[in-house]
Image: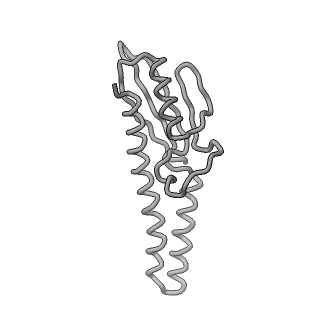
């Protein structure tokens, strides 16, 4: 039930150059490499380093770059985890808590608190989509 996405683009770069560019982008953003083969790079943000709280919305939780040959071009695919299941469950639990609290105590404004958490999750999803697209663009640019 994890919310994953996949984006891809084509390029004329050689596989070796693409892998070097992928590793450079991941190292720049301090992602940890989980698995590295000749055409797949799997990464995670959980590399043991400390991060600021505001970096939470700008980092992919984990993902995988793959380079595949198609005709005379290489296809670079990025499959990433947009929102982990634990975050979805947490936000639903908070939303339900405040909804039930509001109904029991007839404080219907408490729905707003749960709604704020829900909107933060939606904001994170769209923000991470743009982060992933910019990472992919940075890899394939000249």
Along the viewing direction, whichever of 105 and 29 lies nearer the viewer: 29
Left or right, 88 with respect to 46, comes to left
Rendered residue at 60%/37% (across/down): 32
Rendered residue at 57%/43% (across/down): 45
Q: In this view, does 119 lie above or below 129?
A: below
Q: Where is residue 55 in the image (x, y as percent from the top left)?
A: 50, 52
Q: Position of residue 112 (x, y in %)?
A: 44, 74
Q: Farthest right residue?
A: 48
Q: Is residue 31 above or below residue 98?
A: above
Q: In this view, does 96 lie above or below 74?
A: below
Quadrant of the rendering where the C terminus is positioned: top left
Along the viewing direction, whichever of 77 and 23 lies nearer the viewer: 23
Along the viewing direction, whichever of 71 and 28 lies nearer the viewer: 28
Q: Where is residue 79 in the image (x, y as percent from the top left)?
A: 48, 36
User: Residue 94's image quarter?
Assistant: bottom right
Rendered residue at 35%/18% (across/down): 12
Tell me which colouring the rendered structure shows: one colour
Rendered residue at 48%/85% (across/down): 107
Q: Farthest bottom residue?
A: 106
Q: How many labels does the image show?
A: 0
Q: Position of residue 131 (x, y in %)?
A: 42, 44
């Amino acid at each position: 039930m994890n919310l994953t996405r996949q984006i891809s683009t084509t390029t004329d770069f050689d596989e070796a150059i693409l892998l070097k560019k992928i590793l450079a982008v991941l190292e720049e953003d301090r992602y940890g490499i989980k698995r590295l083969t000749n055409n797949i790079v799997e990464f995670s943000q959980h590399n043991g380093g400390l991060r600021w709280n505001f970096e939470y919305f700008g980092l992919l939780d984990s993902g995988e770059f793959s380079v595949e040959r198609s005709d005379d071009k290489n296809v670079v695919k990025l499959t990433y985890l947009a929102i982990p299941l634990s975050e979805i469950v947490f936000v639903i639990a908070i939303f339900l808590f405040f909804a039930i609290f509001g109904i029991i105590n007839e404080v219907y404004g408490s729905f707003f608190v749960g709604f704020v958490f829900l909107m933060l999750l939606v904001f994170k999803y769209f923000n991470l989509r743009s982060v992933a697209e910019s990472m992919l663009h940075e890899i394939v640019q000249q």
